[in-house]
Amino acid sequence: MGKVIGDILPQAVAVAISCVPIVGMILILFSERAKINSLALLLGWVAGLSAVTAIVYVLAIQANLKPHSGPSTAVEIIKLAFGVLFLAIAVSYWFKRPKKGDEPAMPKWMSAIDRLKPGMALVFGIGLGVLNVKNLPLTIAVALTVAKAHLGTSNSIVVFAIFIAIGSIGVAAPAIAYLVAGKRVSKPLDVTKAWLIENNATVMMVVFLILAAVLIGKGIAGLAS
């Protein structure tokens, strides 16, 4: 189990580094329903990641992936494909960087956060957790890795719990800080929000570039072995 946990840690950290969801959480913390909506968003985030891992894991187990089997050509090609995709996304983020003096553009949906009800905040969290080009393939990859290792149900749940806990740190940290310290963290959260909005393109470029390097490297190594 320890080896599998080590294998999925990079994906977990990559999921945690999600600027837009973190900004969304911070914006909710400045809204009227801050406490209930922040908890609903976090619950949605966790539920989304849990659902994807569970569904893919069950399907993979039913497909009877072989433990400790040699690398599959199809799997390695998929890794290479995702690596190339992530590299292309990294390049696109490079060109999206705001020029000096430009005001970074905020997604239009952020303006509606103040009007969210708890149910919509829950759905919002699910969407932010899994319906994006980074988190979904990473979560699927983790589920496949665990299924192929054939750890058993209990150990697999432990690995998934670790993945989801680490992957949720970025979104959970602002909510926990607000619930513990209340309005006293308003200024630090506002500063963090402004920094993330300003540097979103650069941060995501670096994340996608690292993921591309890892996946392309693993794909080439698997095909060459």
Image (cartoon, rainbow, N blue to C red):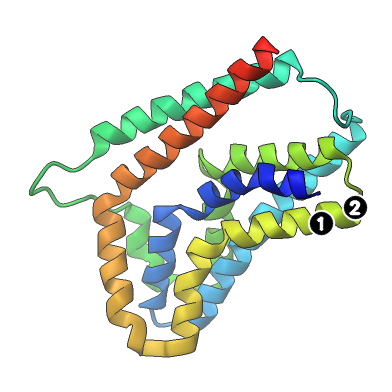
Badge 2 density bin: few <14, some 14–19, many ≥20, Cα 10 Å: few
Q: Amino acid at mark 1?
A: Ile
* SS for callout 2: helix
Which residue in the structure is indicated by mark 1?
A: 157
| 217 lies left or right of 192 | right
| 106 lies left or right of 212 | left
Q: Residue at x 23, y 40 (%)?
A: 97
| 221 lies left or right of 206 | right
* SS for callout 1: helix
Please tell me whether residue 198 is drawn above or below residue 131 in the rendered image: below
Contact flag, marks 2 and 1 (Cβ < 8 Å) = yes
Measured in 3D between alpha carbons, the distance from the residue under mark 2 to the one under mark 1, in whole angstroms, is 6 Å
Say which quarter of the image contains residue 32: bottom left
Q: Residue at x 31, y 67 (%)?
A: 192
Q: Is residue 34 visible?
A: no
Counting from the top left corner in percent of width and height, residue 89 is at: 40, 30
| 217 lies left or right of 193 | right
Please tell me whether residue 171 is drawn above or below residue 140 in the rendered image: below
Residue 153's disc number: 2
